Image (cartoon, grey):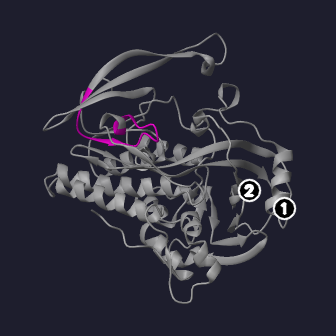
């Protein structure tokens, strides 16, 4: 694989967005390579909800196994502190997929990696983009091959170093390489702040809490808290915390598990969970059994000033980071990846001009600015409940949907998104 110096598309980043983009390209018959700076998939659930729109795309891509691995969620309830105020029916979005799905990001990545291997398209781990140079007919990419030197016990404790470099010529490059995107950096695209940093205390634990098909969002003076039912009788509580200094590394994902895992999240434990439930959700009567994962996690909210240009384009966290409650960034990224793959397929076959890529970039960026309420909050239509209208932005960024699906869910509660300005 390393001797293959040319490809139609080089996808940089082996998370769910990069894997799914590469899978869509491969299924369309486009020659593609997929590289990632890390050494394997993530080790925890992280972004855990798949929107209805994403489920449609996964089904189209022969990834229906995900449905058996996840928990179906048909509704989301909103609380005003301890008072229930609103129920949004997720099942009304699609007759075929009348739910969203909770599944660990590690499980999703494992499934997608398996689908890529079936197509003889392995993720090239330990490969990072060092630099790129855009010519009129190609992008010249320098790839660093990283190697870990073991210290005599768990290999994760070894030191990383660049073993060698290689060059790849690609007709197009897709940057799916996250918030520290090397592609975005090489293109010198600004990554502007789109809202205050949010810190969340996250707990995943075994519980008999019900119902298992509803998610709950609590809005109060402390911020936003969300309860997601997970497969196999687990629940995840995420509580927004006040201002605190967390290292930027708390945004990094752990790779691998067991003895080799590297934990970058500050610790929170069972006592913290009990205290936060008592303060934020005393109505929660579910048991708290085994805690599978917990930690304090820092989330930035950012927006690239452009989705790319010419022969290099961005998807997912490389272009935007939203509030984690509605899991919009990953799902929006996967939906972007499907659209971008179709655009690239058509351009490479001469069926469309390169202008279709520029249109993709303008429209998607405008949609993101609207969806994340960067420029304006949703407006209350006639009949909107005053509490709903007052919390319109928090509701919009908490719902598990993007694009037209998000507009449809907001319509249930008499809210409407401002019109996107695709300049």
| Pointer 1 with pointer 2, Cβ within 8 A | yes
Height in image: 364 above or below 39?
below
Left or right: 124 in relation to 51? left
On residue 333, the disc is: none
Residue that badge 1 annotates: 286
- Residue 95, visible in the rendered structure: no
Left or right: 197 in relation to 206? left
* Coordinates of residue 109 in the picture (x, y in percent): 52, 44
* Coordinates of residue 29 in the picture (x, y in percent): 27, 48
Query: Which residue is more in the foreground, 31 or 380?
Result: 380
Q: Earlier in the sequence, mark 1 or mark 2?
A: 2
- Tell me the magenta residue range: 168-184
Q: CA distance from mark 1 to mark 2?
A: 9 Å
| Residue 149 part of the magenta-drawn span | no
At x 65%, y 28%, the residue is: 262
- Count residues near mark 1 (Cα–Cα under 10 Å), then give few for <14, some for 14-19, many for 20+: few
Identify the image quadrant of residue 257.
Answer: top right
At x 59%, y 33%, the residue is: 249
| Direction bottom: furthest residue | 383
| Residue 175 part of the magenta-drawn span | yes
* Coordinates of residue 334 in the picture (x, y in percent): 43, 54
- Residue 173, visible in the rendered structure: yes
Height in image: 419 above or below 137?
below
The C terminus, quarter of image: bottom left
Identify the image quadrant of residue 22.
Answer: top left
* Coordinates of residue 407 in the picture (x, y in percent): 46, 74
At x 77%, y 74%, the residue is: 83
Query: Which residue is more in the foreground, 399 or 93?
Result: 399
Report the number of discs: 2
At x 60%, y 53%, the residue is: 48
């Amino acid at each position: 694989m390393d001797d293959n110096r040319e490809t139609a598309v080089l996808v940089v980043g082996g998370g769910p967005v990069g894997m799914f983009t590469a899978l869509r390209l491969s299924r369309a018959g486009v020659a593609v390579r997929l590289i990632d700076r890390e050494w394997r998939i993530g080790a925890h659930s992280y972004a855990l909800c798949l929107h209805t729109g994403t489920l449609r795309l996964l089904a189209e891509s022969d990834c229906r196994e995900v449905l058996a691995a996840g928990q179906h969620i048909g509704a989301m309830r909103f609380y005003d502190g301890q008072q229930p105020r609103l129920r949004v029916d997720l099942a009304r979005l699609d007759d075929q997929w009348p739910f969203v799905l909770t599944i660990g990001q590690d499980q999703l990545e494992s499934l997608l990696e398996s689908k890529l291997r079936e197509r003889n398209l392995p993720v090239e781990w330990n490969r990072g983009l060092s630099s790129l140079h855009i010519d009129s007919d190609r992008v010249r990419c320098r790839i660093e091959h990283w190697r870990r030197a073991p210290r005599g016990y768990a290999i994760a404790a070894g030191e990383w170093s660049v073993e060698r470099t290689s060059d790849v010529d690609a007709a197009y490059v897709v940057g799916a390489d996250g918030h520290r995107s090397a592609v975005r950096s090489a293109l010198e695209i600004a990554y502007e702040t789109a809202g205050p940093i949010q810190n969340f205390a996250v707990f995943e634990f075994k519980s008999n809490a019900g119902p298992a098909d509803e998610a709950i969002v609590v809005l109060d003076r402390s911020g936003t808290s969300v309860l997601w039912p997970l497969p196999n009788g687990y629940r995840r509580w995420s509580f927004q915390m006040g201002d605190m200094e967390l290292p930027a590394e708390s945004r990094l994902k752990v790779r691998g598990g067991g003895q080799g895992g590297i934990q970058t999240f500050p610790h929170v434990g069972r006592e913290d969970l009990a205290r936060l439930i008592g303060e934020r959700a005393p109505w929660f009567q579910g048991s708290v059994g085994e805690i599978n994962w917990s930690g304090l996690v820092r989330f930035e909210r950012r927006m690239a000033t452009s989705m790319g240009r010419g022969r290099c384009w961005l998807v997912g966290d490389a272009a935007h980071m939203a509030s984690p409650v509605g899991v919009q960034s990953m799902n929006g990224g996967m939906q972007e990846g499907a659209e971008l793959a179709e655009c690239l397929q058509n351009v490479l076959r001469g069926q469309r001009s390169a202008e279709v890529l520029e249109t993709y970039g303008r429209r998607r960026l405008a949609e993101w600015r609207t969806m994340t309420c960067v420029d304006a909050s949703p407006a209350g239509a006639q009949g909107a409940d005053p509490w709903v209208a007052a919390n319109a932005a928090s509701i919009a960024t908490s719902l598990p949907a993007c694009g037209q699906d998000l507009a449809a869910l907001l319509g249930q509660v008499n809210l409407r998104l401002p019109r996107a300005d695709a300049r």
